[in-house]
């Protein structure tokens, strides 16, 4: 077929190297991880989800990837892992390639609290996200706004402003 123009320079640049995300903040072991790392180093879950988008209506997707809790847990958040109250002080902020950012509480993903199976996707609808970057999967959300795509960073920490 003709009529398909060459990719722009920015599209080409974005597709030559796998995108990685950084785990940062109040962590004992901050890390940079590619989608291949997320696939190789943690057990993969599968989630069939439907979420509503204000612009496009309901979206159906199948995602695979590790639990956010497992990945961030291995980076060792600076809490006492044996103390639920200590863990409950922590937040996560997930940022996408376009700067869109959302927040979660540690308690959402903690097995002793909401135990939500939130994933860092390595594949969507059977296709690897190696070049696009990982996507946050929040199966319990009715709306798609927290399904952050092309994740560049996950910040973990406590909020100095809470309660001020
Ligand atoms: N990086 C990034 N991720 C994002 C958004 C965004 O603007 N930037 N929009 C969110 C919203 S509002 C929705 S509904 C879903 C849309 O997912 P889809 O494009 O796969 O349907 O992506 C979410 N993830
Ligand atoms: Mo949306």
Image (tube, grey):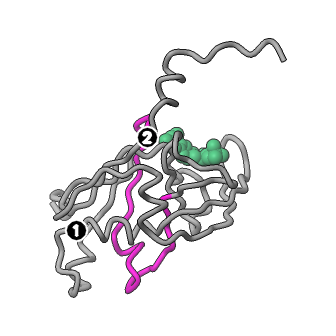
* Residue 108 lies within the magenta run: yes
For residue 2, what is the image quadrant? Answer: top right
* Bounds of the magenta segment: 96-120
Picture quarter with the C terminus: bottom left
Q: Nearer the viewer, residue 30 or 88?
A: 30
SS label for mark 1: loop
Pointer 2 residue:
19
Please state which of the two labelled residues, at mark 2 or mark 1, is closer to the viewer. 2
Pointer 1 residue:
77
Q: Nearer the viewer, residue 41 or 3?
A: 41
Neighbourhood count class around disc 1 (C-alpha, 10 Å): few under 14, some 14–19, many 20 upward: many
**Residue at the extreme front:** 40
Residue behind label 2 places its C-beta within 8 angstroms of ligand 1: no
Determine the residue positioned at 23% across, 72% down: 89
Gap between marks 2 and 1 measured at Cα: 23 Å
Residue 95 percent across, percent down from the top left: 39, 46
Tell me if residue 82 comes above or below residue 54 in the rendering. Answer: below
**Residue at the extreme right:** 1
Q: Is residue 110 left or right of residue 36?
A: left
């Amino acid at each position: 077929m003709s009529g398909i123009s060459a990719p722009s320079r920015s599209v080409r640049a974005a597709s030559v190297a796998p995108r990685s995300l950084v785990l940062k903040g109040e962590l004992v072991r901050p890390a940079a991880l590619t989608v291949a790392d997320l696939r190789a180093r943690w057990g993969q879950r599968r989630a069939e989800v439907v979420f509503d988008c204000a612009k496009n209506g309901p979206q159906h997707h199948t995602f695979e990837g590790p639990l956010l809790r497992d990945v961030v847990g291995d980076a060792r958040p600076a809490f006492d892992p044996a103390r639920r109250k200590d863990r409950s002080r922590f937040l996560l902020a997930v940022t996408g390639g376009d700067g869109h950012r959302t927040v979660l509480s540690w308690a959402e993903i903690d097995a002793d609290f909401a135990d939500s199976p939130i994933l860092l996707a390595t594949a969507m609808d059977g296709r690897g996200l190696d070049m696009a970057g990982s996507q946050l999967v929040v199966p319990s959300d009715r709306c798609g706004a927290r399904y952050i795509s092309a994740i560049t960073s996950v910040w973990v920490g406590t909020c100095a402003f809470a309660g001020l």
